[in-house]
Image (cartoon, helix red, strand yellow):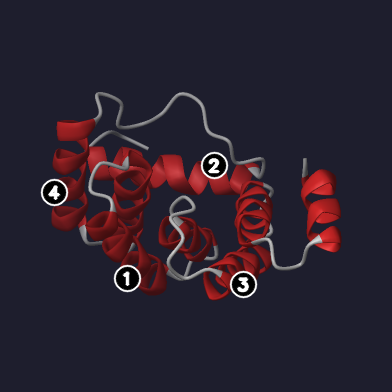
Amino acid sequence: MMALVDRALAINPSFARGWMLSGLLRGFDGQHDLSIELIETAVRLSPRDRMGQPLSAIGAAYFFKHRFDEAAANLLVAIQDNPGFSLCYRTLGACYAHMGRLDEARAIVTRLRAISPEVVPSILSYRNPEDRELLLSGLRLAAGEST
């Protein structure tokens, strides 16, 4: 899929949704710096277009880079933008847990449970095992489970 999106962007470099998709795919692949860059390009090209959750994806990329303060800032805004998007809550809860802010992490998990029955997902799209474990260990900690 990355090759197809790259081809589409070579044909039309103004394709904001293509940049967004490319950034999401790079994030799932563990290429977090590139993911942030591509998603920011999409937002610059079309700042008013509702093309997914760019701040959630950028927040997740910062989370996986262990830049938890920047991740939390982006994720909080993403939650304000779309309060029903459970992935933001999962990533933010894990982020707070890894920051040692367990009370805030547990509060986020409480909010997550109000919109989704699944706190710790059984399937994750992240290809990098370290990324998956960082998210899952943070979620377990935030949910009060043993890691």
- Give me the C-alpha separation between circle 2 and circle 3: 26 Å
Task: Identify the residue at image location x=34%, y=44%.
Answer: 90
Question: Where residue 104 appears, x then y in whole percent?
Answer: 16, 57
Horizontally, is 7 left or right of 105 in the view? Answer: right
Do residues under tags 1 and 4 come within 8 Å of each other at their CB atoms? no
- Give me the C-alpha separation between circle 2 and circle 1: 21 Å
Residue corresponding to mark 2: 132
Residue corresponding to mark 4: 107
The label nearer to you, 3 versus 4, is 3
| Helix, strand or loop for disc 1 | helix
Question: Where residue 11 appears, x then y in whole percent?
Answer: 85, 59
Crowd rating for badge 1 (residues with CA inside 10 Å; few <14, some 14–19, many 20+):
some
- Give me the C-alpha separation between circle 3 and circle 4: 33 Å
Three-letter amino acid code at the position of disc 4? Ala
Whichever of labels 1 and 4 marks the residue nearer the N terminus, that label is 1
Whichever of labels 3 and 4 marks the residue nearer the N terminus, that label is 3
Disc ID at residue 73: 1
Crowd rating for badge 2 (residues with CA inside 10 Å; few <14, some 14–19, many 20+):
some
Whichever of labels 4 and 2 marks the residue nearer the N terminus, that label is 4
Residue corresponding to mark 3: 41
Task: Identify the residue at image location x=48%, y=49%.
Answer: 134
